[in-house]
Amino acid sequence: MWALRAAGVLWLLVAAAAGPCPRPALPPDTVLSTVGANITLPCLQRQLEPNGTVSWKLENQAGSSERAVLGASLLLRQVRYDDSGRYSCYVGGCLVRSLRLLVDEPPEPPGFSCYRRSHVKDILCEWQPQRRPSPRTRAVLWVKRLTGENATEQRCRYFPKVEKFTCRVTVPPSEDDTFLLVSMCISNGAGSAVSKDQVISPDPPVNVLVDPVESAPQKLRVNWTYPPSWDPRFYRLHFQVRYRAERSQSYTEVKLQHGEKETSLVIHDAWHGARHRVQVRGLEEFGHGSWSEWSQEAVGTPWTGRTEREGRGSLGATPLCPDSQGLGGLGVGDHSTVPLYTFLVTGGSLFLGTGLLAGIVLRYKKKWRRGSLGQGKASAVVQHPLVPLAPPSPTSPLSEAPLLSPPASPGAPGSGDFGPFDVTNMDYLLVPQ
């Protein structure tokens, strides 16, 4: 498969074109050798004369391999690419034979990729060989349209800095939707190789995530992103999702339709409480090429509600009861969203407030009761009449002096404002009757 690595992948290319890729024919006087081999170039087919002097000359080249003349032959050890050229043999100063040495390696089959940055740009196809090609290696791109026309040849250029071949295909704006067949031919003096028939296939989607849907025990939300090698600003992909429960062996496949959100899907028939494995693959939006490989598996479990029930306690299990008047379905269960600690805080506050109020009422009630009793005692003492006592008996041992003084005249000194009795002596109140 082609690894599509640039922005705006070329969706026109799908298979190899039937272009010629023959091995180049070598001239009769050419000697072919591989890199690193020892090669012997003969000069004469017959025996050298005793007085003959043999010499070799490499025309317009400066070979780097070690050379040794053995009789009428030239020995080259561990030849390299720059040893290629025409070698001439001279006997007595006269040219006797000329041979062409070609040092080369058979080319490897190309595995190229194509891309297009936008609809107004040319198509670029690139191939980077695993080893550095010989200077005589050539690359040709064969392009054929499905309209029945013959394949056309596009020359490719090798860039030594990046070590890759690059081919350019020009597509007129009027043929922008044309279906093209493309192949690449690599050839040199040692042989030729052609690319295999290939079909455009994007890389699989990445970052596949599976998340539960809240309050939906049979749903899963799947999200993914485009592969880094495919830029959706120029060409889009269609996606297909397959999923299964871990306990099941068969997959359920869902293909996203046009107009749907490209990189997400909600699964509606997931198994309650079961782990599911999900994969996604993509196809070029116009249906050209083939589906990508399936992405890596992502695992997810639908919503179970365990955390919700633990937080709500018994309130979450209360069924809804319709209103007796039929005006609504509001029941106790509708208030289950209020946290339990709210009820505890409210109830505790009311309990403490009621207790405090009762304490204050009892305290003031006791004070009021004590105040009313004190006033009653004071009024009883004030309103008690003073009764005069009989004069003391001469034989009384209690006192020699009278407790009450006789009344004085109003004008007498010391009479004051006292009444008919003198109560300054408090012992008067303690005398038994």
Image (spheres, rainbow, N blue to C red):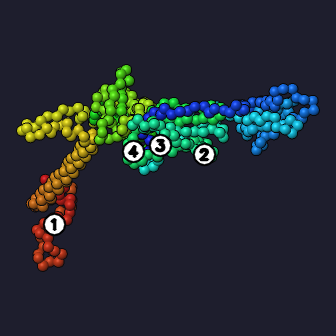
Query: Label 4 vs label 1: CA separation?
Result: 142 Å
Q: Amino acid at mark 2?
A: Phe
For residue 71, the mark is none
Left or right relative to 290: residue 108 = right
Query: Label 3 vs label 4: CA separation?
Result: 17 Å
Query: Label 2 vs label 1: CA separation?
Result: 143 Å
Q: Position of residue 21 (x, y in %)?
A: 55, 33
The answer to which quarter of the image holds residue 227 is top left
Query: Label 3 vs label 1: CA separation?
Result: 134 Å
Q: Which residue is mark 2?
A: 159
* Helix, strand or loop at mark 1: loop
Q: Which residue is mark 3?
A: 115
Q: Which residue is mark 1?
A: 422
Q: Amino acid at mark 1?
A: Asp
Left or right relative to 333: residue 259 = right
Q: Position of residue 72 (x, y in %)?
A: 85, 30
Dot 4 or dot 1: first in sequence order is 4
**Residue sitting at x 44%, y 42%:** 9
For residue 175, the mark is 4
Dot 2 or dot 3: first in sequence order is 3
Q: Residues within 10 Å of mark 3 (few under 14, many from 20)?
A: many
Query: Label 4 vs label 2: CA separation?
Result: 29 Å
* Helix, strand or loop at mark 4: helix
